[in-house]
Image (cartoon, grey):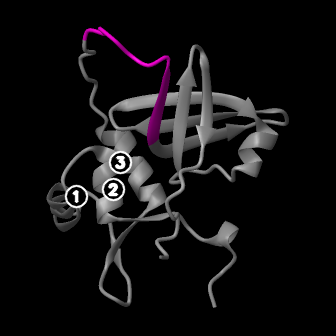
Amino acid sequence: MNPPKNLRKAQYKIGQVASLLGVSTDTVRRWTESGELDTRRTEGGHRLIDGKDLARFMAKNAKPIEPEQVVAQSARNRFPGIVTRVIKDKVMAQVDIQAGPHRVVSLMSREAADQLELEPGKMVVASIKATNVVVDLPEISQNNES
């Protein structure tokens, strides 16, 4: 019997991590084999990466990029990423997201952060329009069940 969804740890397959980081699955495998990124094996032999470990890895290895000259760009941008830190007080929450090479910070109500069950390692999508950052949960499975 599986634990309730809200009690399961965020874990990601090699392909999901590669997609989030914009690298090949071979690159992620090399990182796991060299010990740069920890994995655990399922009973079926698949490698899974803990969301909190991935969040630490992404924050530690983020490299600044030179911005391209903007010729035409959508007014609304969506950045899939991993939550690296959540700071809450009685009313508000600060949510830090590592989206590829970009660190995105969202300020939201504590109630919203609690309802989304935001914590380091959770996959999210930061939607940015003007000066507001809206955090959505992606439709992909958080616990690798098909």
Q: Position of residue 118 (x, y in %)?
A: 64, 49
Amino acid at dot 3: Leu
Q: Is residue 41 above or below residue 6?
A: below
Foreground residue among 36 and 114: 114
Residue at mark 1:
28
Span colored in magenta: 69-80
The answer to if 36 sits in the magenta stretch is no
Residue assigned mark 3: 20
Going from the N terminus, do you reach mark 1 or mark 2 first? 2
Of pointers 1 and 3, the one earlier in the residue sequence: 3
The residue where tag 2 is placed is: 17
Mark 3 touches mark 2? (CB < 8 Å): yes
Residue under the point 26% across and 44% down: 22
Badges 1 and 2: C-beta atoms under 8 Å apart?
yes
Q: CA distance from mark 1 to mark 3?
A: 11 Å
Pick the residue in front: 37 or 134. 134
Kindly identify the residue that appears in the image at 30 percent across and 64 percent down: 14
SS category of the residue bearing label 3: helix
Left or right placement of residue 144 versus residue 110 in this view: left
- Which residue sits at x=52%, y=63%? 142
Three-letter code, disc 1: Val
